[in-house]
Image (cartoon, rainbow, N blue to C red):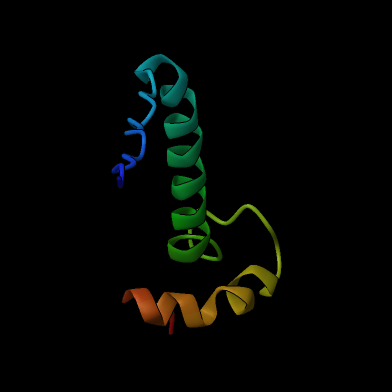
Amino acid sequence: MAHAVTAPVSRPAAIPVRELLPWLVFGGLLMLLALYFVGAEQGATAIFSGMYVHEFTHDGRHLLGFPCH
C-alpha cells in the first residue's frame, strides 16, 4: 500500500513597513549622494578642489547622459 507524502506549505514572512522604512530612507539618501557626485560635482557646487571626483565619475557621467565637457 503506497501513501502519498505531501510537503509542508511555507508562507513568506511578512516584513513590516516600520522595519523597512529606515532602510528605504538610507538607500534614498545614498542614491541622492551618488547622483550629486556624478551629476554636479566639479561644477558650480563643487565641494572638493581638483579634478579627482570628476575623473573618477567621468564614464558614469557619459553613461547617464550628463554632459561634462
State whether residue 56 appears in this view: yes
Residue 59 is left or right of residue 10, and the answer is right
Above or below — where is 43 with respect to 66? Answer: above
At 35% across and 19% down in the image, what residue appears?
A: 17
**Residue 1 or residue 63, whichever sits in front:** 1
State whether residue 67 appears in this view: no
Q: Position of residue 37 (x, y in %)?
A: 53, 59
Picture quadrant of residue 65: bottom left
The image shows a total of numbered marks equal to 0
At 68% across and 57% down in the image, what residue appears?
A: 48
**Residue 10 or residue 15, whichever sits in front:** 10
Picture quadrant of residue 9: top left
Identity of the residue furthest to the front in this view: 1
At 70% across and 70% down in the image, what residue appears?
A: 50
**Residue 45 or residue 25, whichever sits in front:** 25
Q: Position of residue 30 (x, y in %)?
A: 52, 45
Q: Position of residue 21 (x, y in %)?
A: 41, 23
The C terminus lies in quadrant: bottom left
Residue 49 is left or right of residue 7, and the answer is right
Above or below — where is 14 with respect to 6? Answer: above
Q: Position of residue 11 (x, y in %)?
A: 32, 30
At 38% across and 80% down in the image, what residue appears?
A: 63
The N terminus lies in quadrant: top left
Above or below — where is 43 with respect to 11? Answer: below
